[in-house]
Amino acid sequence: DTEVTQTPKHLVMGMTNKKSLKCEQHMGHRAMYWYKQKAKKPPELMFVYSYEKLSINESVPSRFSPECPNSSLLNLHLHALQPEDSALYLCASSQDPSGGSGETQYFGPGTRLLVL
Amino acid sequence: GENVEQHPSTLSVQEGDSAVIKCTYSDSASNYFPWYKQELGKGPQLIIDIRSNVGEKKDQRIAVTLNKTAKHFSLHITETQPEDSAVYFCAAPTGGFKTIFGAGTRLFVKA
């Protein structure tokens, strides 16, 4: 199984809502990532978890809160978002954190988020 | 930090022709160069990658070449088909877990 799954596929939320994005992989990967992708742009790294610990936070606003409950799951909690946060949110995983960014990343299909 | 430049931004070819996309990187310590294909409504999917100890790698109609001296690597697609139409991203690592993506190339294959 080389699949990363993400739910929901689409999400519309108001600026006062609280919602969560979920990501799951069963490949035994120990590094998991959140990316944000705006239309016609490349993915931008937000967070990296290595062995369920937060390794990188790319100066992401606190209205985005990541969580890694176990080695297979990654959540992104959203609160008080702004319209400019509307984007495709991608989750990815890679096998061995000791390989750093030299490891192949496997991406999920993404959650398309619209903030009204 | 790493900087990755990708050209062209848009590429239109006739079915059956070849397509070439080029990337340059700045960090001479980079040692892994993946290429991703992103179709509409999907996440990026790895199509081929190359490590710095080889100069070329081929997988059926897709090949990647690497010139470490010049710090550039290229994606070559031969005998293009309409299903090759997508956005292609090159990428390079920049220490730790960070991967920097090129700006992307939108490939159109005309039937």
Image (spheres, rainbow, N blue to C red):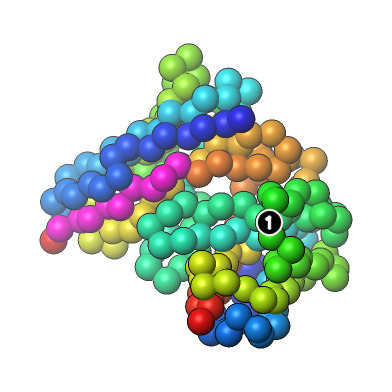
Residue extending furthest toward the top? B69
Residue at left offset 35%, top offset 34%:
B22
**Where, quadrant-wise, is the C terminus of chain B in this rendering?**
bottom left
Q: Is residue B108 magenta?
A: yes
Residue at left offset 61%, top offset 36%:
B93
Horizontal side of residue B38 vs B8, given as left or right = right
Report crowding for label 1: few under 14, some 14 to 19, many 20 or more residues within 10 A (C-alpha).
Answer: few
**Image location (x, y in percent) of residue B16:** 17, 50
Residue A4 in sight from this viewpoint: yes
Residue at which label 1 appears: A60
Horizontal side of residue B76 vs A36, given as left or right = left
Type of amino acid at the residue the image marks with label 1? Val
**Image location (x, y in percent) of residue B31:** 60, 29
Secondary structure of the magenta portion, mostly? strand
Q: Is residue A16 magenta?
A: no
Q: Is residue B106 above or below residue B100?
A: below
Residue A33 in sight from this viewpoint: no
**Where, quadrant-wise, is the N terminus of chain B in this rendering?**
top right
- Identify the chain of the residue marked 1, using the numbered disc in the image: A
Q: Is residue A80 above or below residue B85?
A: below
Q: Which residues are magenta?
A: B102-110
